[in-house]
Amino acid sequence: MKVATEMKILALDSSSATGSIALCRDECLVAESLLNVRSTHSEKLLSQIDMLLNEAGWKLADLDLLAVVTGPGSFTGLRIGIATIKGLAQVLGKPVVPVSSLQTIAMNLPLASLPICAFLDARKKEVYSQLFEWHCDAGPVAISSPTVLPPERLLAELPKKVALVGDGVPLYRNMISEILADGAMLPVATAHQLRAAPVAWLALQAWQQGLAVTAGDIVPTYIRPSDAELNLKK
């Protein structure tokens, strides 16, 4: 396991309509920006990174580790976020850690005693999902593979008692109540938003285990084919 003093981390999430950037010093959050506004990530990411660095008194060259959510999520959003981090990593020569959006949203339910179901809106009347269990030393640990399914089918396959978190929860709340009834533990509304601070924490754990990669190794995790790929097959 790698050990370092005062790792300065930049983490970025652009996998959904909610874009988020965080600066952390080791496990300590220094600054974070979260925007849930009607604008493309390409219009906001670089300016938000610059703003946070200025507020923290950091320079780009001070960064030791970069982290980015690689999916699943919005195809366009993922490409923008990954391209941004790739560009910074190549210029700075810094390592990068790819982080799952599903594991990131599961971080919003710390110490949950029930299985945690990451439940993210995938559009097209489907949800991205994966089951996790909480470990005090490692955070959410996957106990199933990531999937993309219609919500009614996924809910029918879940354990009888489960905690659900993600932007798909408010979207399908009535369906969740009908299928799982009292077996569903649902957190408050603010818990369903992805944030970059947990991305930084997960990236630090991965880096300590030697799992960081170079910029060229970062690729999006789509789970299902894009519309462009489907059109090509037609």
Image: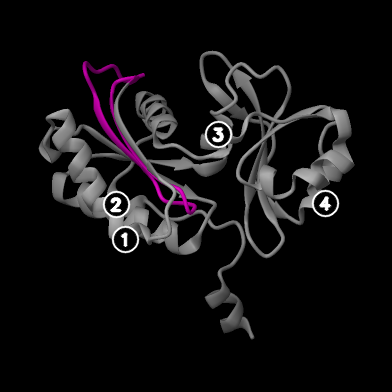
Magenta residues, start to end: 1-28
**What residue is shown with label 2?**
45
Q: Amino acid at mark 2?
A: Leu
Q: CA distance from mark 3 to mark 1?
A: 24 Å
Expressed as whole percent of the image width and height from the top left, the position of residue 1 reads 36, 19
**What residue is shown with label 1?**
42
Q: CA distance from mark 2 to mark 1?
A: 6 Å
The residue furthest bottom is: 234
Q: CB of mark 3 within 8 Å of CB of mark 1?
A: no
Q: Amino acid at mark 3?
A: Thr
**What residue is shown with label 4?**
152
Quick one: SS at disc 2?
helix
Closest to the camera, between mark 3 and mark 2, is 3
Q: Amino acid at mark 1?
A: Ser
Quick one: SS at disc 3?
helix
Q: Amino acid at mark 4?
A: Glu
